[in-house]
Image (spheres, rainbow, N blue to C red):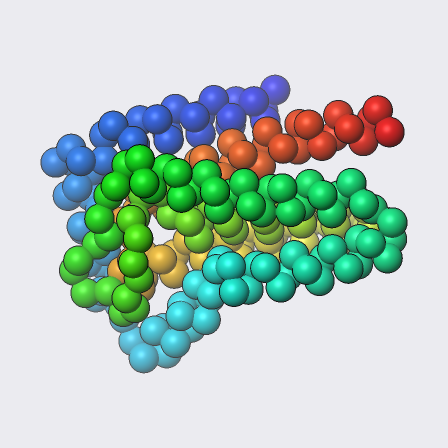
Amino acid sequence: MLKWTFVFLCLFIFVGLVFAYPTPFLTDFDVKILLFFEDIRTPFLNQFFTIITALGSIKVLFPVCIGASIYLAFKKYYIEIGYLWVLFWSSRGLNFILKEWIKRDRPSLHPLIEIGEYSFPSGHSMNAIVVLGFLCYLLLTMLKINKTWRIIWFLVTGVTILLIVISRLYLGVHYPTDVLAGLAVGYLLLVSFLHFFTGMRKKG
């Protein structure tokens, strides 16, 4: 019940942001948050978040998925490999379609790195919650680990996703509404795939 409550909440958030992000209230909110992160920038944080943001990029997630696939193949979890790659490319494809549909320009305040394409929703946020979320699910359901380690791995995954999201704001390449929308639609995609995935497992 709680899962589906989050599903409807995320759907409401995403659809709402699609139509409401240009409003003066949210525009002012977006700018204020980015200016806050600009004010706290330091050389150390600049380097730290530049490294962190790479964790949500295809340059890192693609090799991670390859490594996970090799491990899954060794364990003969072939269905899981298929779902992992379908989910990986679905996240990227859906993000591209949404960006081309909405066509929101990236922030032009003082970004620390230069990125092309459109801004809404955040691809890094989507990639992080979809891919890292699915890998976390596989780890928790495949490996026989105690409750303490399950909680630790869940928290590590959650903190990593959160840091990736914050990195996009800190670097000035996304508005807060971009990353919030990315998390919302990413969660919807992940839960949808997990619903079919668990159904396939039960049939198997």
Question: Which residue lies most toward the left here?
Answer: 24
Q: Quadrant of the C terminus?
A: top right
Give above or below for 169 relative to 91: below
Q: Residue 149 occupies which quadrant of the picture?
A: bottom right
Question: Which residue lies most toward the bottom here?
Answer: 43
Rendered residue at 52%/22% (across/down): 5
Rendered residue at 61%/56% (across/down): 156
Left or right of 38? Residue 183 is right
Judging depth in this view, the residue of 137 and 118 nearest the camera is 118
Judging depth in this view, the residue of 41 and 139 nearest the camera is 139
Does residue 73 show up? Answer: yes
Position of residue 132 measured from the top left corner of the image (x, y, whole percent): 60, 51
**Number of marks in picture:** 0
Q: Residue 198 occupies which quadrant of the picture?
A: top right
Rendered residue at 68%/27% (across/down): 196
Position of residue 109 measured from the top left corner of the image (x, y, whole percent): 16, 60
Left or right of 144? Residue 33 is left
Does residue 183 show up? Answer: no
Rendered residue at 64%/61% (across/down): 64
Position of residue 61 measured from the top left corner of the image (x, y, whole percent): 57, 59
Q: Quadrant of the N terminus?
A: top right
Left or right of 195? Residue 50 is left
Position of residue 34 measured from the top left corner of the image (x, y, whole percent): 23, 56
